[in-house]
Amino acid sequence: MRIGNSSGLLLTWLATLCAAGCATQHPVESTVAELPPHAYEQSAQDAIMALPLFKRHPEMAHYVGIGNPVPAYQTSMPLLGGKVVWKGYMVEINYNVTNFFGVSHAATRYVLYDGDNVHDVVGDYSEAGVHLL
């Protein structure tokens, strides 16, 4: 009896997952109407430095480099897809973080843009439900 209940729950979960995948919206690149952000390098650095940790300890973050803006979109449910809640451009920014003990490591954040305005800053864009177009 327990095996039957477990199988039923598993099948229900799989059906829900498939239904959510079918309901996921996938915009095309032409739906990102605005142009890539202008002068995004400084606004991306400013967005990183506005994060709570670096706002209190700006000496901890050392800018390394920045990528080019790429079209992207964000869905409402990161793991299951869902509706598109944001679309615009994403910029990868790399920096070194030095902790209180002087140990340094490389870090990457992603800055999301609505036109020329910063929409959000995310660490792992796939966990945040952001997808490249």
Image: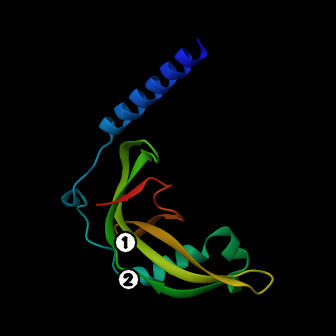
**Which quadrant does the N terminus fall into?**
top right
Q: Looking at numbered disc 2 in the image, what kind of residue is underneath it?
A: Ala
Q: Give percent across and percent down for residue 65.
A: 47, 86
- Of all residues, the one furthest to the right in this rendering is 101
On the image, the x and y values in percent for residue 39 come to 38, 83
Whichever of callouts 1 and 2 sits on the residue coming sooner in the sequence is: 2
Question: For mark 1, does the 10 Å Cα neighbourhood hold few (<14), some (14 to 19), or many (20 or more) residues?
Answer: some
Label 2: few (<14), some or many (≥20) within 10 Å?
few
Q: What residue is at 32 percent from the left and 36 percent from the top? A: 23
Image coloring type: rainbow
Instruction: Check disc 2 and report its element: helix, strand or loop.
Output: loop
In the rendered view, would you say 47 is above or below 130? Answer: below
Position of 69 with respect to 106 (left or right) is left
- 123 shown above or below 103: above
**Residue furthest out toward the top:** 1
- Disc 1 residue type? Asp
Q: Do the numbered discs 1 and 2 sit on residues whose CB atoms are within 8 Å?
A: yes
Q: Image quadrant of residue 53?
A: bottom right
Q: Looking at the image, which is closer to me, 23 or 49?
A: 23
Residue bearing the label numbered 2: 39
- Left or right position of 50 against 29: right
Q: Residue at x 70, y 86 (%)?
A: 59
| Label 1 SS | loop
User: Could you tell me which quadrant the C terminus lies in?
Assistant: bottom left
Residue where numbered disc 1 is placed: 116
Marks 1 and 2, how far apart at CA: 8 Å
